[in-house]
Amino acid sequence: MKLIIESTDLKDYLKETDVVNFSHPLIIEAITELFNDEQSEIEKVKIAFEFVRDKISHTRDIQSSKITSKASEVLQHKEGMCNAKSNLLAALLRSQGISTGFCYQRLMMFDTPDKGYLLHTLNGVFLRSLDKWIRLDARGNKPGVQAEFSTKEEILAFTVQENFGEKDYPIIYTEPKTITALEDNTNASNV
């Protein structure tokens, strides 16, 4: 799939926002622990991706009802839905000057279309050293879900099944588009 950027200005993918709050003390602490000046851009992206994927639980996987949205909340509680986890990954990478955006997939909620669909969030990351965008899915692995870091091919958590009405959206947005779903709910089972 050919990715489409919402903005041609890479600085738009570096902005700090209310939810991508990389100046928060908790995020700064994590940045200090994860990154150093010796690491390459690709190493930093892989480290951040694996940290969010493996150290931050997916709320549904742990059967929690907690809602987190801001990157700092996700880090504080060590959990979040896919959209919240993508906010944390964006915060970590943007803090390092690595342009990071937000991408979406329309997926079946369960195993058949009649049970409804959800909007799954992942990140688009621009690698200057390779002059290309890649998509990463830090949702979190579990049996049947295996996302990996790769600069050569996409290894996302979910493969879109178009014959079931699922869709892969090619746009890399500068800001997350699903924040109201998180902010308007107090229980993760409603999201």
Image (tube, rainbow, N blue to C red):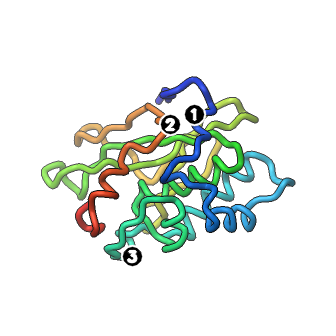
Q: Residue furthest right?
A: 38
Which mark sits nearer the N-terminus, 1 or 2? 1
Residue at point 36% right, 67% down? 67
Q: Position of residue 49 (x, y in %)?
A: 60, 56
Crowding at label 1, few (<14), some or many (≥20) Cα neighbours within 10 Å?
Answer: some
The quarter of the picture where residue 127 lies is: top right
Q: Position of residue 83 (x, y in %)?
A: 42, 54
- How far apart are the two marked residues, 1 and 3, measured between alpha carbons? 34 Å
In this view of the protein, can residue 149 be seen by the observer?
yes
**Looking at the image, is 116 positioned above or below residue 28?**
above
- How far apart are the two marked residues, 3 and 2, measured between alpha carbons? 29 Å
The secondary element bearing badge 2 is classed as: loop
Tell me if label 3 and label 2 are in contact, CB under 8 Å: no
Which mark sits nearer the N-terminus, 3 or 2? 3
Q: Is residue 38 left or right of residue 51?
A: right
Q: Amino acid at mark 1?
A: Asp
- How far apart are the two marked residues, 1 and 2, measured between alpha carbons? 6 Å
Q: Is residue 7 left or right of residue 110?
A: right
In this view of the protein, can residue 155 be seen by the observer?
no
Q: Position of residue 60 (x, y in %)?
A: 35, 69
Crowding at label 3, few (<14), some or many (≥20) Cα neighbours within 10 Å?
Answer: few
- Residue 62 is tagged as 3
Which sits in the foreground, 74 or 114? Answer: 74
The secondary element bearing badge 3 is classed as: loop
Q: Amino acid at mark 2?
A: Thr
Q: Amino acid at mark 3?
A: Ile
Which sits in the foreground, 176 or 189? Answer: 176
The secondary element bearing badge 1 is classed as: helix
**Looking at the image, is 114 positioned above or below residue 164?**
below
Tell me if label 1 and label 2 are in contact, CB under 8 Å: yes
Which residue was labeled with disc 2?
A: 174
Which residue was labeled with disc 1?
A: 12
